[in-house]
Amino acid sequence: MIFSPTALAEKHVLITGATGDIGREIAKVVAQMGAKISLTGRNEEKLKQLKLELENLVPKENIFIQFGDLNDAVDRKKIVEASELAHGTFNGLVNCAGVAKRSMVKDLSEELLHDVMTLNFTSTVLFTQLVYQKMIPNKQGSIVNIASLSGLRGTIGNAPYSASKFALIGFTQSLALEAIQHHIHVNAICPGFVEGQMAKEIIARKAKENNISYEKQMKITSESIPSGTLTQPEEIANITGFLLTGIASNVVGESIKISGGAVL
């Protein structure tokens, strides 16, 4: 743990997508920085397991979970209201919920495009709006959007996901300019391949597309990164923790790359 255990003491941070590899690691880091955290996700069982895990690290009263689907307007409101009731005013929001689906444009279905854009962009924007409105009267806060290198450049077979992350980065920049007037900082983190289930699924699909083994596709992927390695979830979590502290007051609307040198 690189941060002080009181770096976020008495701060309330809401984290979406908390049951994924990245969200889970962010929850661990932020909790150990002393924050009161509210966690949400669509897998209730995994949320409960994460809560138990975190209660072995920090006081149990600092951990609140609320199951819900960000694509559902009723659930979005319920998550915000229940989290505020549990831990009070919001000091931070980490938007980590997302889905990665691949398709060549010639084969792209409206259903797949809708699924990706809805969760990665539309629902994230609408959920952020609810929390942001709560932050404005307090004249402070930090919002961190977990975007992707795919939001900075397109790649073959990645049009729907890339478009959703380009949109998220555009939203980040526009909101950042509005929010800083209320002393609320908004930034994005843009990782490439991250060690975990989502990367495994993407690499497996690419292997199938290229008619090669998973192991060979993983080797190709790793060798395409100058550092030679996939990003670890804790790297993203540590940068998120830093942004939530607000210590760098002039970091506004940035898209912080974690690429291993692949995208400069």
Image (cartoon, rainbow, N blue to C red):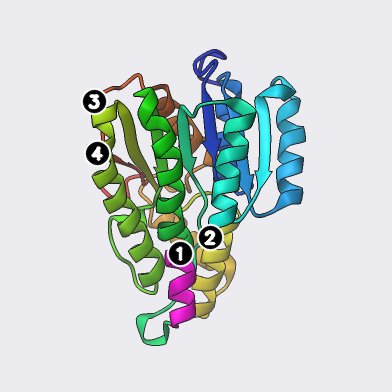
- Residue at the spot x=28%, y=28% of the render? 182
Q: Secondary structure at mark 1?
A: helix
Note whether 250 is above or below 230 in the view shown. above
What range is drawn magenta here? Answer: 109-118
Residue that carries the numbered disc 2 in the rendered image: 71
Q: Residue furthest bottom?
A: 106
**Dots 4 and 3: beta carbons under 8 Å?**
no
Mark 1 crowd level (few <14, some 14–19, many ≥20, 10 Å Cα): some
Residue type indicated by callout 4: Glu
Query: What secondary structure prevails in the magenta region?
Result: helix
Residue that carries the numbered disc 3 in the rendered image: 250
Q: Looking at this view, is 73 or 198 the one in front?
A: 73
Report the disc number at residue 118: 1
Q: Is residue 48 visible?
A: yes
Residue type indicated by callout 1: Thr
Point out residue 17 in the picture as x, y percentages from the top left corner: 57, 48
Question: From the viewer's perspective, is the residue at label 4 or at label 3 nearer?
Answer: 4
Distance Cα–Cα, label 4 vs label 2: 25 Å
Residue that carries the numbered disc 4 in the rendered image: 178
Note whether 76 is above or below 243 in the view shown. below
Mark 2 or mark 3: whose residue is earlier in sequence: 2
Mark 4 or mark 1: whose residue is earlier in sequence: 1
Point out residue 209 in the picture as x, y percentages from the top left corner: 49, 79
